[in-house]
Image (cartoon, rainbow, N blue to C red):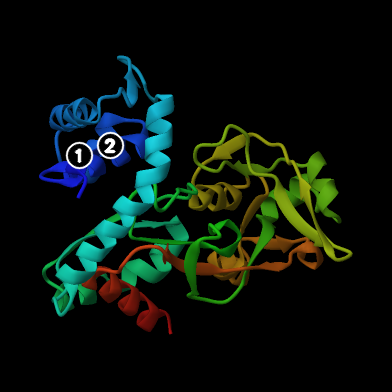
Amino acid sequence: MDTLLSGSDYNQLRAFVAVGEFLSFSRAAEALGVSPSALSQTVRAFEERVGARLLNRTTRSVALTDAGEILLGRVRPAVTELGDALVQTRCSGERPTGLVRVHSFRLAGERYLEPILGRFARDFPEVVLDVTLDDAVEDVVAGRYDIAIRIGEVIERDMIAVQLGPALRQIAVASPAYLERHGKPEHPRDLLQHRCVRWRWPGRATPYAWEFFENGAWFEVAVDGPLIVNDKNLAVSAALQAAGIAFAVEDVVREQIGSGALVSLLEPWCADFPGYFLCYSSQRQMAPAVRALIDTVRSAAG
């Protein structure tokens, strides 16, 4: 057997692959559960062992050398497969324990995670859930998440996706006081003449362009207005206060529409889109704790 694969080389390979994927010692160290200094020493020892510089380091950045790029491309699948095999062997017949990292869109978390937290804690007391709620479209694998919950439009092609609920619909809404002062838009493009409460995807510089459906095709309206938020609940609150027209998931504002606090607008152009899905990687063996959470969420969602 090649001497490079003896002793602690698996750990060194794993360390190199993590840094190569994140291009950050601090993020890779966090994912591996070690200190950045220890990780740096491990990678340096690996470079000395293979006899080549694999990473270029500065005080602000990390980059792969040509040799590092080639090596990462060749060893990453093998390291992933080895790790999965070890997890599968270790977890065979094992009760659910350990950490499960979850990334979920905010509304999906409120609907599908929040109601099962108490039950899950009672049923699986040795499992720790690390839940991140935000509307950023994170790379599940690169972010070291075990599970993600997001809308169907933004699921990576190599993920397994299990539908949790029905299709969703976004509708424009405004308060009666706003409509009394500014009138009612009759077509989505009339929104360009109105004050709208805009929402911005996390990590993106420009606000989301509202999407409508007409003659068999979707089209966008880049609305304008006095307020930009990154939280959709805040947008609804602003609409209730007559700050402008908001664009919200219909289920979220159904009660306010029923009470008359908000008025739905432009419904003929508001079409359904894929709802929420529970997603996980198709290329990794599943730990019992991850399977337990998936089964619990699916059961509760019906």
In this rendering, position of residue 130 left or right of residue 98: right
Residue 134 seen anywhere in this rendered image of the structure: yes
Q: Is residue 274 above or below residue 225?
A: below
Q: Position of residue 61 (x, y in %)?
A: 36, 21
Q: Judge from the rendering whether residue 283 lies leftward or rightward of residue 42; answer left or right.
A: right
Q: Secondary structure at mark 2?
A: helix
The picture places residue 261, in percent across and down from the top left corner, at 60, 61
* Neighbourhood count class around disc 1 (C-alpha, 10 Å): few under 14, some 14–19, many 20 upward: many
> Camera-side residue: 45 or 230?
45
Mark 1 element type? helix
Q: Amino acid at mark 2?
A: Phe
State the residue at coordinates (34%, 67%). Answer: 113
Q: Does the CB distance between marks 1 and 2 fall below 8 Å?
A: yes
Q: Badge 2 is on which residue? A: 16
197, 207: nearer the viewer: 207
Between 154 and 118, the residue placed more toward the observer is: 154
Residue 25: image quadrant is top left
For the point 36% across and 31% down, the residue is 23
Q: Write the residue at 29% across / 74% down.
A: 291
